Amino acid sequence: MEMFFEVTLKLWNGFLTTLQIFGLTLVFSLPLGLILSFGSMSRFYPLKWLVKVFVWIIRGTPLMLQLIIVYFGPGLLATSMERAGITNVFYHIADYLNSFSPLVATVVAFVINYACYFSEIYRGGIESIPRGQYEAGQVLGMTKTQIFFKVILLQVIKRIVPPMSNEIITLVKDTSLARIITCYEIIWAGQKFIKSEGLLWPLFYTGVFYLIFSGILTLLFGYIEKKLSYFKA
């Protein structure tokens, strides 16, 4: 029983880091994704295609690869520039980024990755609203901003909640990738008991934390969908 409580405490400490990654990723990626979605729908074609190519690259490459690039890339770049005798502003930026902790590097990579996925969900939701609703708002004398926030936004939220909930629950599980750059999250905490105590069950025990957290999110999003059901015809 004493070992069980010790394992639970260690896993809880690792899970707190998991929660940090999860929370910070959502705080920054949700608004960034909305900005990217506006860029991908822009009528200024250079911006539109720049955003689309960026989103395509991020969505088309593994998150694990992006984690490695964000964490190790700046240091390797700074070292190469130093060897070449280059000490310009880009060198100092790379050297500064190299000082980021594994947790910061993880959050940066996750924010970029999930912002790109969220941007496509936002774009799909916004473009699914019939054009006639925009025109009706203009006939009533509303500005584009008023139309978006008073007419379109809640309908978009209703439509994007299911795909958004899937991505957010996937984020819970993707946080386990942080261990590859030595970020002490719950999987790392569970794996340490294999090396130190020869115990395998703590690693399986981590699944309980993920299941409970994912279950809470599932209930939360189900409640949100129910509250937004008044949009049904």
Image (cartoon, rainbow, N blue to C red):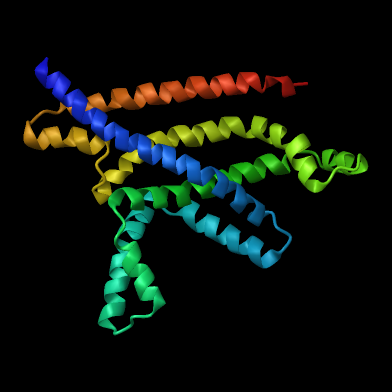
Side of 27 where 79 appears, left or right: left
| Residue furthest to the bottom | 85
Side of 6 where 39 appears, left or right: right
Residue 74 drawn above or below residue 195: below
Residue lying at 49% horizontally and 19% vertically, measured from the top left: 219
The residue lying toward the viewer, choosing from 177 and 29, is: 29
Q: Where is residue 174 in the image (x, y as percent from the top left)?
A: 37, 39
The residue lying toward the viewer, choosing from 154 and 53, is: 154
* Quadrant in which the N terminus is drawn: top left
Q: Where is residue 65 in the image (x, y as percent from the top left)?
A: 35, 55
The residue lying toward the viewer, choosing from 220 and 124, is: 220
Residue lying at 32% horizontally and 43% vertically, measured from the top left: 177
Residue 140: quarter of image: top right
Question: From this viewpoint, is residue 220 visible?
Answer: yes
The residue lying toward the viewer, choosing from 100 and 212, is: 100
| Residue furthest to the left | 197
| Residue furthest to the right | 139
Q: Position of residue 87 (x, y in %)?
A: 33, 80
Question: From this viewpoint, is residue 64 visible?
Answer: no
Side of 52 where 209 appears, left or right: left
Residue lying at 25% horizontally and 81% vertically, measured from the top left: 83
Residue lying at 20% horizontally and 35% vertically, measured from the top left: 189
Residue 226: quarter of image: top right
Residue 85 drawn above or below residue 15: below
